[in-house]
Image: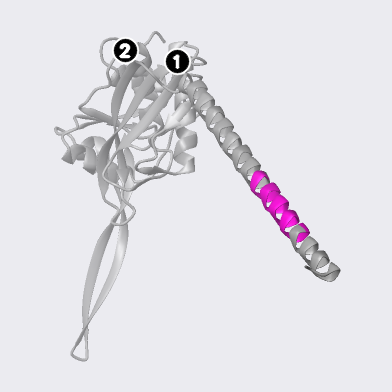
Amino acid sequence: MQSSSGKDAALVALSVLLVFTISASFIFLHEKQVTIENLERELAAKERLLATYAHNKTWLPQSSLGAASANIVAVRSVDNVGVLGGVRVEVKEGNGRTLVNTNPFVEPDTQYSIRTAVEVAARFVGVNLSERDVVVSFDINGTLIGGPSAGAATTLATIAALEGKEVRCDAVITGTIDEYGNIGAVGGVFEKALAAERNGMSLFLVPEGESVVTTYERKVEERRIFGFVIKKVYYMPKEIDLKDYFDGSMQVVEVGRIEEAYKYMIESGAAEI
C-alpha cells in the first residue's frame, strides 16, 4: 500500500504532466495558427501584387504608332573628339509619359532637354499626347550622354514619328531646344563638324552664329641657350568659317528655329509656316 504522502506526490506529478501536455498543445495550436495567418497574408500580398501588375500592364507602351530616327553628334570628354550617333523616338499607346532609355546613361540635363523636345514637337504637329507615350533611345559610341545639344535632333525625330515621316539620314543637326522652339548655341561645333564630315554627312545644321568658330592652333618655338634647347608651347586663336572649310564636301547651314530645321531635315514634305 502507498502512503498518503506517496499518493500526494503521484497526484502532483500527474497534475504537472497534464499541465505540460495542455500547454504544449496550446503552444502548438498557437504556432500553427500563426503559420496559417502568415500564409494567408503572403497569399493576399501576392494577389495584390498580381492585381497591380495586371492593372499597370494596361499603362505600359504596347503597339507602336510611329517611329523615326535622327543623327546626333557629340564630343567625347576623354579626348575631345567628335563622334556620330543617333536618337530614336517611338510613339506608343500610353498615358502621356516621356520615357528615356538609360542605356547608355543619360544625365538629368539631357533628360530635361528630351522632355522639352517632345513638348515642342507635339505643339508643332498639333497633337495631344495625353494618351500616348514617347520613348526616346540613344545609340552613340559612349557610356554616358550629357548636355542638351541633342535637343533639336530629338525634336525633329519626334515630329517625324508623329507625322509618319523620316529624317534625312545624310544630315545632322546640333543645337539645344527651348520651350518656344528656338535652337540654341552649343559647344564643340568644330569637333562635331569634323565628325559629321568624316562620317559622310552632306548637311550639317548649326545654331545661328555658330558657323564661324574659334579654334586654338598649337605653336612651338625653340630657342637654344647655353647649349640647351628650350621649347615654348603656346596656342593661337584662329577663326574658321565652316562654310568655307567644308566647301565641296559638306554643306553647313545656320538655323534659329525648329521650323527652319524641319525644312532641311524632314523628308516627304515641308511644314506650313
Q: In terms of secondary structure, where does tag 1 sit? A: helix
Q: Is residue 198 magenta?
A: no
**Start-end of magenta stretch:** 15-29
Quickly name the residue at label 2.
Answer: 164
Disc 1 or disc 2, which is closer to the eye? 2
Work out which residue is located at the far bottom of the displayed protein and give it.
Answer: 226
Residue 110, horizontal then vertical, whole percent: 44, 39
Query: Which picture quadrant has residue 252?
Result: top left
Query: Which picture quadrant has residue 237?
Result: bottom left
Quickly name the residue at label 1.
Answer: 124
User: Image quadrant for the N terminus?
Assistant: bottom right
Amino acid carrying label 1: it is Phe
Amino acid carrying label 2: it is Gly
Image point (17%, 41%), residue name? 198
Image point (33%, 36%), residue name? 138
Q: Nearer the viewer, residue 63 or 71?
A: 63
Is residue 257 visible to the viewer in this orientation of the structure?
no
* Magenta segment, prevailing SS (helix, strand or loop): helix
Question: Dot 1: within a 10 Å radius of its alpha carbon, few (fewer than 14), some, or many (20 or more) residues?
Answer: some
Residue 271, horizontal then vertical, whole percent: 37, 11
Residue 214, horizontal then vertical, whole percent: 33, 48
Image point (64%, 43%), residue name? 34
Q: In terms of secondary structure, where does tag 2 sit? A: loop
Residue 192, horizontal then vertical, whole percent: 28, 42
The mark tally for this picture is 2
Q: CA distance from mark 1 to mark 2?
A: 14 Å
Image point (29%, 27%), residue name? 70
Query: Which picture quadrant has residue 206?
Result: top left
